[in-house]
Image: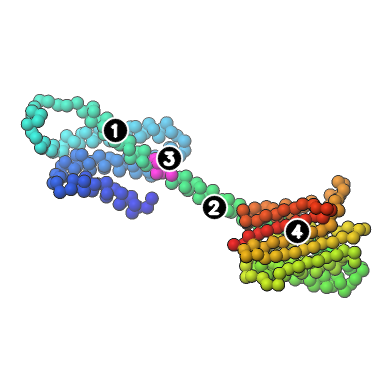
Amino acid sequence: MSISLHFIAWVILFCFPILYAGDQFVKTDFLIRTSWLPLLWSAVLFYLNYFLLINKYFFNRRIVAFIGINILIVALFSVLNNVLMEFLPRPVPHFPEFPPHNEHFRPSKLPFLFRTAAALFIPLITCLAIRTTQRWLEMESEKKENDNQQLESELLHLKYQLQPHFFFNSLNSIYSLIDTSTERAKQGIHSMAKLMRYLLYETTANKVDLVKEIDFLQQYILVMQLRMKEDVRIISSFPDIIPSWEIAPLLFIPLIENAFKHGISASKPSFIHIVMEIGESEVMLSVENSYYPKSEVDKSGSGIGLENLRKRLAGLYPGKSELKQEVLYQIFCTNLIIRIH
């Protein structure tokens, strides 16, 4: 709560008896005895707890000390309130004949002490509720900030983990061409330089233009086609009209990389079909490739790319992305949908 809100609240409380009286005249001594003095004790008790006691004792789980100190303070304020009452002028009763005036009659002060003490517990409970709520909101805000920082750290780590993984597979593809086709290897190195430039300078931002991401995918497919044999059929289709959307970088490449790495057989005809479509508010990538399951002794390709992709999608597009993988008639099918808007 801001200082202005505290000030306004107490001004209203102190003025409330006057406002409630309406046109009736209220004497100052009556207001002091019945309203302003109890409110003064309430304010002191409220801010003692607000700034000191709740933070020092209640939030540190020293509940017994917190309760004991407040009981002592309430008892002290109750006694001081009744002592001060003796020095304040007593209001003249409206009907002095009821009851008959008796100078020797002194009513017991114990009920008044209990009444004052009970009234002081109201600002104490109110203060405790306010500070507990504020503490909860602060903790939720800190938790959300820590979660966001952790998410950003994980995404950065995943992106750095993805790039070496991608470079390793791409360089292997070009390396295999050096002895068989020097020109194609040179072409592959040139295309690889473009891919590296994109990864080094474009993907440092949280979002990239969708058209640049698609161009990166097309360049990657060209690099991978350089090493393919004639019995490998590769078909790719990308939209001609690309909206000016922005998207998190390197979300589609693991699917295409996975198809080239695990969908090509060294001795059997193979194929890869890559289709990207753009809807009104979503981007869809479908990758189908021939399915040749690896033997259990083959430990190549631990699937780190797809695992990282799932983590990134969960962090970047929670509830706005779908990744499905299935095998149909010896065809490995992967579909990724990302809702941009």
Q: Going 65% across and 68% down the picture, which residue do you hit?
A: 209
Regarding residue 129, the answer to whether it shows in the image is yes
State the residue position of label 4: 255
Crowding at mark 2 (Cα within 10 Å: few <14, some 14-19, many 20+): few
Residue 130 falls within the magenta-colored stretch: yes
Badge 1 marks a residue whose secondary structure is helix
Hey, what amino acid is under mark 2?
Glu
Residue under the image location 91 percent in, 58 percent down: 268
* Mark 4 residue crowding within 10 angstroms, few (<14) / some (14–19) / many (20+): many
Q: Nearer the viewer, residue 293 or 34?
A: 293
Q: Could you say where residue 113 lies in the image, as x and y percent from the top left?
A: 25, 30
Residue type for callout 4: Leu
Instruction: Give the left or right position of residue 11, taking residue 50 as reference.
Output: left
- Residue 94 in the image: above or below residue 265: above
In which image quadrant can residue 84 be found?
A: top left
Q: Pick whichever of labels 1 and 2 is earlier in the sequence.
A: 1
Q: Quadrant of residue 239?
A: bottom right
Whole-Å distance between the Cαs marked 1 and 4? 71 Å
Pointer 2 and pointer 3: residues touching (CB < 8 Å)?
no
User: Can you identify the residue that label 2 sits on?
Assistant: 145
Q: Which residues are magenta?
A: 128-133
Residue under numbered circle 1:
117
Q: Nearer the viewer, mark 1 or mark 3?
A: 1
Q: Is residue 234 left or right of residue 111?
A: right
* Image label count: 4
**Residue 56, disc:** 3
User: Which residue is at 16% across, 37% downward?
Assistant: 87
The reply to whether dot 1 and dot 2 touch (C-beta < 8 Å) is no
Question: Mark 4 near mark 3, Cβ–Cβ under 8 Å?
Answer: no
In the image shown, does 35 or 336 lie closer to the viewer? 336
159 shown above or below 93: below
- Which amino acid type is marked by label 1? Ala
